């Protein structure tokens, strides 16, 4: 599946629904993107842009046991693989843009409040926010670094993990996998043995 630039632009400001286990089912690990990109909005599948390293990193970390390629849209089976493990995906800001730097600080802070409300309601074991710069703005933590954060949101542990976008060029699938595996182990999604 491919899109022209004009087709992608038509998805600007479109929202992508959260991918969450059914109400009453455990949410062990909640991955949080900054906001949907245009390709994600077009396919209604999180982290869908070709070249995004989110799903390859999950596979490398052992969180997934088979590849998911959402570029043409995730199948219900793909979504269920994540839900059965207690994994959810949401965004700080719901509206799609071509680049995350199109978001305002106010949008990020308001999105942070919405995310905290979702966490209070669903009580994931671990929240993993992908992108330290957006995290700093959204949650008023200008000195935050990648890794587990010192405070909890209620009972939820909070991690900042690297953004899997291809624009984050100093990260590789291997380094992303290590960071995602750390959050997944803390959530009980992976065993306690570090992944290679």
Image: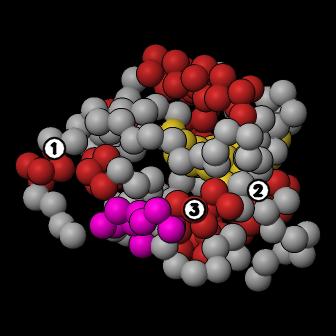
SS class, disc 1: helix
Q: Splitting the image into 4 quarters, where does residue 11 fall? A: top left
Question: Residue 29 placed where, x, y %?
Answer: 72, 51
- Looking at the rendered image, the disc whose residue lies closer to the viewer, 3 or 1, is 3
Position of residue 72 in the picture relative to residue 165 (left or right):
left
Q: Tell me the crowding category of disc 3: few under 14, some 14 to 19, or many 20 or more residues within 10 angstroms, Cα based.
A: some
Q: Earlier in the sequence, mark 2 or mark 1?
A: 1
Most foreground residue, 121 or 130: 121
Position of residue 90 in the picture relative to residue 51 (left or right):
right
The residues colored magenta run 69-78
Q: CA distance from mark 2 to mark 1?
A: 34 Å
Q: How many marks?
A: 3
Report which residue position mark 2 lands on: 183
Q: Earlier in the sequence, mark 3 or mark 2?
A: 3
Q: Main secondary structure of the magenta part?
A: helix
Residue at (23, 37) in percent of width and height: 12
Report which residue position mark 3 lands on: 80
Most foreground residue, 174 or 55: 55
State which quarter of the image contains the C terminus. bottom right
Position of residue 136 in the picture relative to residue 3 (left or right):
right
- Looking at the rendered image, the disc whose residue lies closer to the viewer, 3 or 2, is 3
Q: CA distance from mark 3 to mark 1?
A: 29 Å
Question: Residue 128 placed where, x, y %?
Answer: 68, 47
């Amino acid at each position: 599946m491919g899109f022209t630039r004009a087709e992608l632009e038509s998805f600007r400001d479109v929202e992508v629904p959260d991918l969450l286990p059914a109400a009453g089912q455990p949410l062990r690990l909640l991955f949080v993107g900054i906001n949907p990109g245009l390709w994600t909005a077009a396919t209604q599948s999180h982290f869908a842009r070709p070249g995004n390293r989110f799903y390859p990193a999950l596979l490398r970390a052992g969180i997934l046991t088979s590849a998911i390629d959402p570029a043409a849209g995730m199948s219900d089976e793909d979504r269920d693989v994540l839900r059965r493990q207690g994994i959810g995906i949401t965004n700080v800001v719901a509206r799609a843009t071509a680049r995350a730097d199109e978001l305002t600080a106010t949008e990020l802070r308001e999105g942070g409040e919405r995310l905290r409300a979702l966490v209070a309601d669903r009580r994931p074991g671990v929240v993993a926010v992908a992108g330290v710069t957006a995290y700093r703005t959204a949650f008023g933590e200008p000195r935050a670094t990648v890794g587990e954060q010192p405070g909890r949101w209620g009972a939820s542990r909070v991690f900042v993990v690297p953004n899997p976008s291809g624009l984050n060029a100093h990260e590789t699938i291997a380094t992303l996998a290590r960071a995602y595996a750390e959050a997944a182990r803390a959530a009980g999604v992976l065993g306690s043995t570090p992944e290679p």
